[in-house]
Image: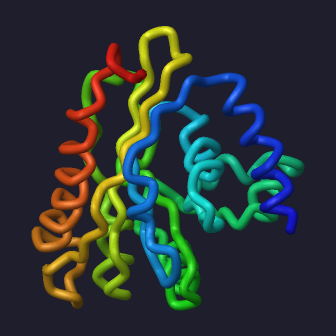
Amino acid sequence: MFYRFIRVIFSIIVKVAFRLEVSGLDKVPARGPAILCSNHISWWDPVILGCLVKRPIRFMAKKELFRYPIFGTLLRWLGAFPVDRGKADVGAIREGLRVLEAGEVVGIFPEGTRQRDRSRLGAPHPGAALLALKTDAPIVPVAIRMSPEKRRVRVLFGEPFKLEHKRDAKVTEEMKGASQEIMTAIRELWMEAKPGEAV
């Protein structure tokens, strides 16, 4: 109930603040576990995705955001859970697995942080690949582009896919390959939405 209420409020704000062009939203599975993987350029990214996708998204967010009492509580109420980006956070992975096993949607920004240089994508962290390999949940790649004046935003959702790598892969070359596969899918969408052509 709280998630839906906040979603309605922010949907209004997003419509006023941005000119959105959205493609492929119907590719997000209507039911069952899914991992939404997007590039990360702004703190607005999770807000925009949360407003666009009808299903609640449980975002994996950096633990620093939860240090602020009020904001941290709000994030938890919205279903987000913390991850320590500086190490292999077993707790965050377990929570992600629990969410997926419950048939819900996990939202992850594989780059791990916002990219100040919007002309490129960052290197991926292994979290999304690990969750996908452990649960066989489909990955929905997403690309977000923002025009120079930051008013025009284009969001492209790609075809869901499953990783074909070894399910028992650890953070090794196999895991890196799986992570790169996810970023390749995001990059293909990202190349379709150039900054000056958002809308």
Q: How many numbered discs sit on the rendered protein?
A: 0
Q: Looking at the picture, how far across and down is residue 16, in whole percent?
A: 72, 24
- In-front residue for pair 11/138: 11
Image vertical order of residue 5 relative to residue 197, above or below: below
Residue at image location 73% in from the left, 53% down from the top: 66
Place of residue 84 in the rendered image (x, y in percent of width and height, measured from the top left): 53, 59
Identify the residue at the far top of this view: 149
Q: Nearer the viewer, residue 4 or 37?
A: 4
Is residue 39 visible from the viewing direction of this image?
A: no
Q: Specify the quadrant of the image occupied by residue 130.
A: bottom left
Between residue 173 and residue 183, name the one nearer to us. Answer: 183
Query: Image quadrant of residue 35?
Result: bottom left
User: In the rendered view of the protein, which quadrant contains the N terminus?
Assistant: bottom right
* Residue at horizontal 76 percent and vertical 63 percent from the top: 76
| 87 left or right, relative to 177 | right
What quarter of the picture does the C terminus occupy? top left
Residue in the foreground of this view, choosing between 124 and 106? 106
Q: How is the image coloured?
A: rainbow
Please indicate whether residue 165 sits to the left or right of residue 18 in the image.
left
Q: Is residue 27 left or right of residue 18?
A: left
Residue 98 at least partly seen: yes
**Residue under the point 44% across and 65% down:** 28
Image height of 137 relative to 7, above or below: below
Q: Is residue 100 above or below residue 88?
A: below
Q: Residue 48 occupies which quadrant of the picture?
A: top right
Q: Position of residue 153 (x, y in %)?
A: 48, 27
- Judged left or right of residue 123, residue 78 is right
Residue sitting at 48 percent across and 69 percent down?
Answer: 89
